[in-house]
Image (spheres, rainbow, N blue to C red):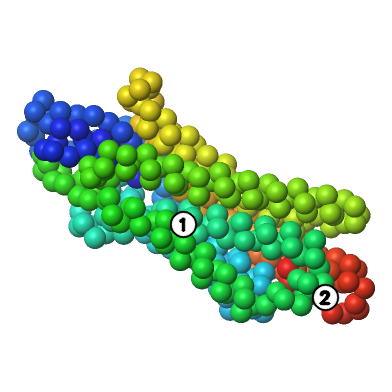
């Protein structure tokens, strides 16, 4: 999703995608637009990476949805992972619109899809991080209050929490629907962010996404993980760390993938005040957006390669690996609940 700012374009201030570029339309030659993407090395690399992300993400998350939704017993644990997979799958379904725009450098899908396809990226960001926060809090509560958790954690309640998370994610994704627009100029149609109704709109949207979709979740997850680590150490449960590593990898992957994007978005806001190089910002945001998109296919990969021991991964099928990745976590923590509550065979099956 590119972002160019077209200043002095009529009476509007607009950003296309996420890169901030200034142009005066009186100096641009009126010539027929020709895409230059396939002639630029960086664009070709990002294009290839995007196609790979789209294909792997689509297939991998479809597989997770099939396994966790139809092949495994419905539990609180599978409810979390199914929701994560749906979020990433939806993103991958609409990612081809961005890839096509990247190749053609011309938006051909109309105003509605400009608004909708763009908002899907942020819907994926917010829904993913909210679900990761929910899982982290759930793990923390299960470790701190095992008896209460085994008596109150149900699939129905988990489903309600997931719905609430999706509603919040949709609400925070609405700015993309509101500010996204199209314009045709020089035989080229652009899908861009039009922040001309309020000079502070761009900063408000960017900081809201950064705080609600990155900083606040990071703080909550760090607190939860600190509590879990301290509790497990005092309970001598560090040997059963495989499920904890899977969840840690999912969280780390999200924050590492989205960090470059947020960094360059914040630099873009102060571009004029600090004279940041426009070319560096453009390249940084292009790469940052692609790295953020990569998170959509990393989750199923982590399920596969961290769900079983390295020596066993070639001996079992991909389906078995992914199922074990999700099931192992429930079996390990259920044993912990059983010990903590001193109730034989009454611990929750999945945490």
Please report the residue visible at 90 percent of the width from the left and 68 percent of the height from the top.
339
Residue 171 disc label = none
Q: Quadrant of residue 333?
A: bottom right
Residue at screen point 27% across, 38% down: 199
Task: Tally the marks.
Answer: 2
Q: Nearer the viewer, residue 170 or 76?
A: 170
Task: Residue 12: give x, y in percent of width and height.
Answer: 17, 40
Mark 1, secondary structure of its residue = helix
Rate crowding at label 1 as few (under 14), some (14 to 19) or many (20 or more) other CA atoms within 10 Å: many
Residue 88 lies, with reference to residue 1, above or below; the image says below
Residue closer to the observer: 266 or 59: 266
The reply to whether residue 33 is visible in this rendering is no
Q: Looking at the picture, how far across and down is residue 311, in whole percent?
A: 78, 55
Say what secondary structure mark 2 lies in. loop
Q: Quadrant of residue 341?
A: bottom right
Mark 2, residues whose alpha carbon is within 10 Å: few (<14), some, or many (≥20)? many
Q: Position of residue 30 (x, y in %)?
A: 7, 33
Using residue 189 as the reference point, say whether residue 121 is left or right of it: right
Q: Residue furthest top?
A: 275
Q: What's the mark number on residue 347? A: 2
Observer-nearest of 122 and 174: 174
Compared to residue 276, the image places residue 73 above or below, namely below
> What residue did someone put label 1 on?
124
Image quadrant where one finds the N terminus:
top left
Quadrant placement of the C terminus: bottom right
Could you tell which of marks 1 and 2 lies nearer the N-terminus? 1
Q: Position of residue 292 (x, y in %)?
A: 48, 45
Instruction: Name the residue rendered at 85%, 54% in the picture.
Output: 232
């Amino acid at each position: 999703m590119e972002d160019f700012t077209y200043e002095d374009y009529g009476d509007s201030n607009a950003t296309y995608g996420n890169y901030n570029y200034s142009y005066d339309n009186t100096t641009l030659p009126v010539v027929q637009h020709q895409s230059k993407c396939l002639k630029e090395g960086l664009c070709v690399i990002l294009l290839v990476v995007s196609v790979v992300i789209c294909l792997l993400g689509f297939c991998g998350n479809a597989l997770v949805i099939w396994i966790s939704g139809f092949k495994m017993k419905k539990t609180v644990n599978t409810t979390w992972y199914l929701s994560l997979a749906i979020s990433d799958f939806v993103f991958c379904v609409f990612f081809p619109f961005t890839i096509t725009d990247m190749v053609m450098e011309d938006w051909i899908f109309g105003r509605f899809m400009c608004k909708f396809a763009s908002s899907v990226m942020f819907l994926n960001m917010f829904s993913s991080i909210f679900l990761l926060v929910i899982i982290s809090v759930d793990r923390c509560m299960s470790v701190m209050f095992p008896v209460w958790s085994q008596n109150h954690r149900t699939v129905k309640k988990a489903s309600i929490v997931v719905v609430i998370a999706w509603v919040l994610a949709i609400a925070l994704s609405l700015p993309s629907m509101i500010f996204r627009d199209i314009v045709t100029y020089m035989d080229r149609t652009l899908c861009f962010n039009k922040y001309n109704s309020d000079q502070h709109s761009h900063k408000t949207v960017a900081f809201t996404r950064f705080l609600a979709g990155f900083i606040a979740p990071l703080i909550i997850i760090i607190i939860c993980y600190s509590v879990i680590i301290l509790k497990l150490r005092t309970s001598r449960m560090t040997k059963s760390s495989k499920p904890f590593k899977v969840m840690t990898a999912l969280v780390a992957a999200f924050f590492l993938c989205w960090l470059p994007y947020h960094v360059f978005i914040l630099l873009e806001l102060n571009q004029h005040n600090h004279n940041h190089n426009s070319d560096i910002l453009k390249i940084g945001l292009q790469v940052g957006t692609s790295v953020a998109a990569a998170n959509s296919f990393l989750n199923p990969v982590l399920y596969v390669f961290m769900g079983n021991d390295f020596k066993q991964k070639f001996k079992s099928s991909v389906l078995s690996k992914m199922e074990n990745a999700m099931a192992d976590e429930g079996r390990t923590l259920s044993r912990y609940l059983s010990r903590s509550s001193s109730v034989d065979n009454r611990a929750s099956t999945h945490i």
